[in-house]
Amino acid sequence: MRQSGLADLLPSLHAVYAGFSGGSMVMTPHIGEDVVLWKPPSGGDAALGVVDFGIFPHLDHENMPENSMADAEKWAAGLPGPAYAIDDQTAIRVIDGTVDVVSEGHWKLFTP
């Protein structure tokens, strides 16, 4: 997204961005050192920072035992700001900086 120029363009767009899994995590300031699978040449866990909170997707997914609430809590403790752990029946909507959780599942907000 940075290499193509999309990251710089995103804040000026009047559009809806829908991300799932890593596609949602990329909008956050940091994805967390525990979940970094690939590091950019500059290193670190920095993401685009379009929103000011972290996202831990696939909470308690039956095929992902490493995505338990306990794992999410440990992950969130390593982030400098607020973070949401969300299952696959949960979405986070941000309009003009206002955050709204839309869910038929379960989720939790962690605050530092």
Image (cartoon, rainbow, N blue to C red):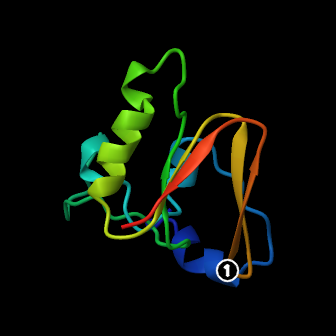
User: Judging from the image, what secondary structure is the residue with disc 1 in?
Assistant: loop
Q: Position of residue 111 (x, y in %)?
A: 43, 65
> Badge 1, how many Cα within 10 Å: few under 14, some, many 20+?
few
Q: Report whether 35 appears left or right of 5.
A: left
Q: Residue at x 69, y 84 (%)?
A: 12
Q: Residue furthest top?
A: 63
Q: Nearer the viewer, residue 34 or 83?
A: 83
Mark 1 sits on what residue?
97
In the figure, residue 43 lies in which quadrant? bottom left
Q: Position of residue 51 (x, y in %)?
A: 55, 71
Which quarter of the rendering shows the C terminus?
bottom left
Q: Is residue 89 above or below residue 43?
A: above
Q: Report whether 4 appears left or right of 9.
A: left
How many numbered marks, from 0 up?
A: 1
Q: Nearer the viewer, residue 99 or 26?
A: 99
Q: Residue at x 70, y 43 (%)?
A: 90
Q: Residue at x 54, y 79 (%)?
A: 8
